[in-house]
Amino acid sequence: QTGCSRKVLSLSLCADMSTKVAVVTGSNKGIGLAIVRALCKQFNGDVYVTSRDVGRGEEAVKTLNSEGLKPKFHQLDINDLNSIKNAAAYFKGKYDGVDILINNAGTAFKASDTTPFGVQAEVTLRTNFFATRDVLTHFLPLVKAGGRVVNVSSMLSASGLKQCSPELQQRFHSEDITEDELVVLMQRFVDEAKKGEHKQGGWPDMSYAVSKIGVTVLSMIHARHLSKERPKDGILINACCPGWVRTEIAAPGAPKSPDEGAITPVYLALLAPGATEPHGKYVSDKEVQPW
């Protein structure tokens, strides 16, 4: 029996169940915070800042409050499976799912960092690919009909793809690559990088690029799966490049502000009801790009 049949509890519970909700990972700063800011202005529903650190997340909410915006906050550390499960249970319980999911959380080493490449590969792939995949594993089943999923990738995924061996390129272009195969390939890169053998294995010398190849291809795999398993639900999932944005990851000389970097992710999150495309695409500057 749901709360909706009980007068006292029902009002707030039913209101939440009918309220639309958007969740943005890694959104206490940078592009993620800019995405939340834009959604607060353009999306008719609750918008959640999520971050690993509760204090920083709550500070981000206060920053937006000072701008007259009213986001909410929930803790979510994408590298912590329990944190993912707890957040998924919260959104399932309060809203019966999510309407918009933007996977923005990510990490990168600066070019000047002297950390061994194998360590950089392991850390970067752990967050950008494997943890993002964990979020999708637990949140995709919660995405409601008409929902939108946006995975923030990078222009380096496209340039990195061109530097892969023909064999790897063929798999990453393939329409029949499975999630399991992609996971094996991403783990192979990490293993070979740790041994200093990634170049012989056909990989580029850029762990960030490889992690974002994984994100882009995973988006395409999930799009095919959704079209097959939930064809009438009208869910659209895409990967996007926000552009070269001034953040802690990029150089201060980058041409785009975080608010400008948020434009394409927000565009994809707010694709009109009933839209059928783009779906399973790699998008930059609001345009589908070749992959």
Image (cartoon, rainbow, N blue to C red):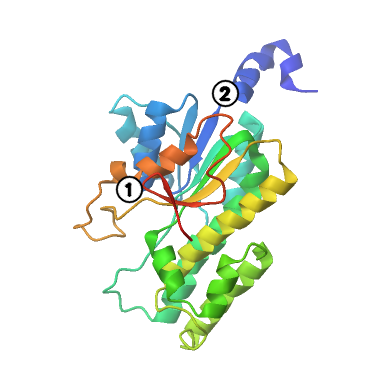
The amino acid on which the numbered mark 1 sits, given as a three-letter code, is: Gly
Q: Residue at x 22, y 52 (%)?
A: 255
From the viewer's perspective, is 22 left or right of 251? Answer: right
Residue at the limit of the structure toward the left, as seen here: 253
Q: Which mark is residue 30?
A: 1
Q: Could you say which quadrant of the image residue 106 lies in? A: bottom left
From the viewer's perspective, is 132 left or right of 34? Answer: right
For the residue labelled by badge 2, is the local secondary structure a helix, a strand or a loop?
loop
Q: Could you say which quadrant of the image residue 43 lies in? A: top left
Q: Is residue 237 visible?
A: yes
Q: Position of residue 104 (x, y in %)?
A: 44, 50
Q: Could you say which quadrant of the image residue 124 lies in? A: bottom left
Q: Position of residue 58 (x, y in %)?
A: 39, 38
Residue closest to the eye, 259 or 108: 259
Q: In which quadrant will I find the N terminus?
A: top right
Q: Is residue 10 above or below residue 121?
A: above
Marks 2 and 1, how far apart in space?
27 Å
Residue on which the image places disc 2: 19
Q: Position of residue 53 (x, y in %)?
A: 42, 49
Residue closest to the eye, 255 or 77: 255
Residue closest to the eye, 198 or 4: 198
Q: Residue at x 65, y 40 (%)?
A: 142
Q: Is residue 80 visible?
A: no
From the viewer's perspective, is 55 left or right of 94? Answer: left
Q: Residue at x 60, y 51 (%)?
A: 136
